Structure formats: C-alpha cells, structure tokens
Image (spheres, helix red, strand yellow):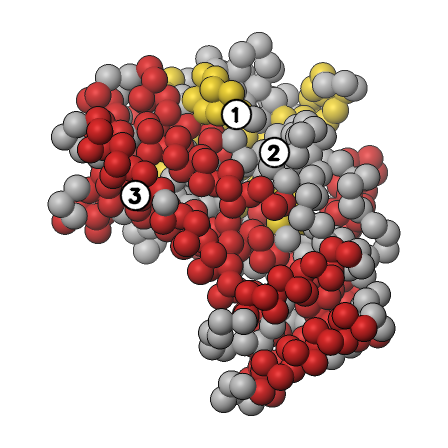
Amino acid sequence: MTNRNQSNLNLENTYTTLPEIFYQKLNPNPVPAPKLVIYNKTLGDSLGLDSSYMTSEEGIQILAGNKMPWDTVPVAQAYAGHQFGHFTMLGDGRALLIGEQITPENERYDVQLKGAGETPYSRGGDGRAALGPMLREYIISEAMYHLSIPTTRGLAVITTGEEIERETELEGAILTRIADSHIRVGTFQFAAKYGELNDLIALADYTIDRHYPYVRSHSNPYLALLEEVIKRQAALIAQWQLVGFIHGVMNTDNMAISGETIDYGPCAFMDTYHQETVFSSIDVNGRYAYRNQPSIAAWNLARFAEAILPLLGSSKEAAVQTAQTAISQFGEQYERNWYAGMRAKLGIFNEEEGDASLIEKLLSMMQYYHADYTNTFLSLTFNHNENMPMAAAPDFQNWQAEWKERLKRQDESQAAVKELMQNSNPALIPRNQWVEKALEAAVQQQDYTVMEKLLHVLKNPYAHSAEQAAYAKQEFDTGQSFQTYCGT
C-alpha cells in the first residue's frame, strides 16, 4: 500500500456500494518491467495529484497495477450491450477501476487501468493492451478535450516490459483513463437482463446521485434521468459531427451515461468530406458511418429507455408511452445543436428559415468536389478561396454570394463574424496521417517526439497559429482506403 499523503491519491470506490452483481473485486496482474511513456501533468494537477510522485518509480508501479494505492478496492465492472445490433454479455475484459479520485474541489473522477490483465469478463482474452492503441486513445481523447468536447482522458501510458500476442507480437501497455464515470447504457442493459428490479433501482439511484442529483426533485426522477441523458447525448453527437469525428464502434456499451465520449477504438477524424465515411475495419456494412451516428445514438438511447422501463410508469403501456415520448425528443434536440453549430461555423448569429438550405448546399458541394471538411471551413473563415478545389465552380460562387448576402442581414460586424468563425472552426484536427506518423515513430522506433509535437499543436486548436498550419495540410487523401482497428 502507498501512503495517501505522499501521492495525493485520494481514492474512494463508491461503486462497491452497488449490489455485487455489478462488479468483481480483484487485483491487477503484475507486469515485469513498467516504464513511463507519457504522463499528463495538466490533468494530474487538476486531479490534485503530485506529478513528481506519480512519475517516480513508486508512482509508475501504481500506474502499472503492480502496487495499489492506499485503501483501494479495485473492481472489474459488469455490463452487457448491443454490439453491431446483437446483444451480448460483456464487462471489463481488460480494465480495472481502481477507485474514484476526490479532487481538492471535491469533484469525483474514475481512475481506470486499461490493459491491466485478465478479468472474469475477459472471455478467453489475455486482458492486455498494445502500445499503439493506448497511445491512439491518449492522442485522440486529448484532441477532443481541447476541442471542448466531453471526453474521458488519459492520465498516463506505461509500457509493461512484456510482449502480447495478437496477429504478431506487440509491445504491451497500460493506459490510465480518467472519466466522470464508466457507467454505460450497457450497464443498465446488464441490470435489466441479469438482475432483479432492486438491482436496477440501485443502479439508477447511484447514477442520479453521481451525475444528476438535481433530478431528485422531479415527480419521476428516473424519467428525468432519461431526459437528461438524451439531452447530453444530443449535444455530444452534434459536436462530433461538427468536427468530423467518427467514433467507429457506437455499441451500447460504448455510450456513457455521463455524456462523455468513451472507448476510442477504431476512431478517426474525417479528411475528405463524405457522409458515408467509415474507417473501422470491422464496420463492413457502414452501420457506424459518419452520417449514421445521430440515428445510432437515438437507437442506443431507446435501448437505455427499454432497460429502465420498469421505473418509468405504473404499467408497461404507460411506461412505453413515456419512453417513446422522451426518445422522440432526441432528433429535435440534436438538430437544434447541430444547426446552431453550423451557423457558428459560417459566422451566422441569428436564425432564418433558409439557413438549413444554405448549409445543405455547402455540404453537398463539399461531397461532390471531394473537399476537405476542416479546411473548407478554414478557407471560408479567412477568405482563402484559392485553397478550395471547388472555388472556381459556378455553383460554389453562387453559394458564396448567397452566404455573403445572408451575413449582411444580421447586425454583427465583419470582425465579429470572423471572430465567431475562428472560434468555431478549429485550425487543425488530429489528422490520420499525423496520428499514424506519431504511432509509427513511437511503436517502431521508440521515438516519442513526433507524438509530443502533435499533442503540443493540438492543445489550442482555435489559436490558428503558423505552427498549426503545417499540421492542417492534407498531404494525402485518407478517405475510404484508410482503415482503423479496434485493438483497445
């Protein structure tokens, strides 16, 4: 055990107050030679952690799971879920929740070791993770955080000193992941399928207390819980779409009740704009393609509503009607968020009836002319038509004239319009080409400088600095030919 005062680790594990059906207590499997690859000092400081301790030999032993912090009860969480539409029993097959860090501001965050070894939910797997996927999650989640999109974050990545068997031998690694919580839609599906009514109630009450305590005063707190989760997911998915983020594996076990982006597996950001873009090697039918993410989110939320149906009404019929009414609000909430974001990307402050048509015309042209999604909006922001492949096309010129007329019909100045666009259109995203270069250098040459430089320029995506401009260029098209793999 470590000394609590030494480390500033201030851990509790309130998850163990739930019925035991929801978790298994166990310790991580030790690793032979842990070595720190990267430590997120800014995040650690915000959690109240002592960075000098956490990066010391003893701290690395904690991040590796070789030594447990003071008074900790590590658990693997049980959950189920629909994977590509098919229901299955799941659970933390390679992750352990070592506790909840209580920050100096009395905020509570899960601390999870991902890749910590076999658990009762591993289903024959070794419970380990490879270095490349752990670094990918670290990079992408940090990019999402700096884009102001709710997300889990990586506190650290360590290598384990062992090789893991996949198609080939890969270097083992563990990611320390920080989250508001790891309660998923799939956690509720597990409770509904395998638990008793009291288990479901206990989970719902715990979730309300953890994330939505203000709904307690509602006439039906469980309905209010459903409505709040719908609201957060509608906002989250709109933010994904606005930056061209494709999650890749939107199974119900990968939808967090807190409203965070979670489980960065075959995720990537879109370069060339196309509604059907898919990067995941296993998504052969495009179930989780870019255009489908809002409808899949609604589908997942319907599964959440089904799971808590016994809590939503005095009869099944009444509960179903209540759930359907709540779920039907998702589409309207999502569109409201998305159109507000698109107006901001185009410098539009107010609403007009023709805005939807203006936006759709632009997106249609972007797809037809194979335009880069991020850079098209950058070109519009800084009036750099020469950077757009469609700039000379008559239909684009007509659209641009229509857009400029639209801007004239609002009170805000040109300077205000440009400021809004600069604050709404990132200078760069973690482009696939740069992420792959960073991972290749790290995994194959043990050179982490490429990743460190990428993380540096991603820290303030709305700065529009000269340094960021080099990372904004699309050196080659990583469209449908580029594939990502689960691995996490």
Q: Amino acid at mark 3?
A: Thr
Judge the density around disc 1: few (<14), some (14-19), many (≥20) Cα neighbours within 10 Å. some
Taking the image as drawn, is residue 439 in sight?
yes
Camera-side residue of 319 and 444: 319
194 with respect to 428 (left or right) = left
Q: Check whether the beta carbons of the residues at disc 2 and disc 1 lie within 8 A of each other.
A: yes
Secondary structure at numbered mark 3: helix
Q: Residues within 10 Å of mark 3 (few under 14, many from 20)?
A: few
Q: The N terminus lies in which quarter of the figure?
A: top left
Residue type highlighted by circle 1? Gly
Write down the residue under mark 2: 287
The image quadrant that residue 472 belongs to is bottom right
The image quadrant of residue 77 is top left
Where residue 347 sits: x, y (%)?
Answer: 58, 76
- Near-viewer residue (154 or 417): 417
Q: Secondary structure at mark 1?
A: loop
State whether residue 486 is above or below residue 473. above
Q: Quadrant of the C terminus?
A: top right
Label 3 to label 2, Cα distance in Å? 25 Å
Residue hosting label 1: 85
Viewer-closest of 318 and 469: 318
In this rendering, the answer to whether 109 lies above or below 41 is above
Above or below, comparing residue 12 to residue 470 in the picture: above
**Residue at 56% over, 89% down:** 413
Image check: 30 left or right of 207?
Answer: right
Mark 3 highlights which residue? Answer: 325
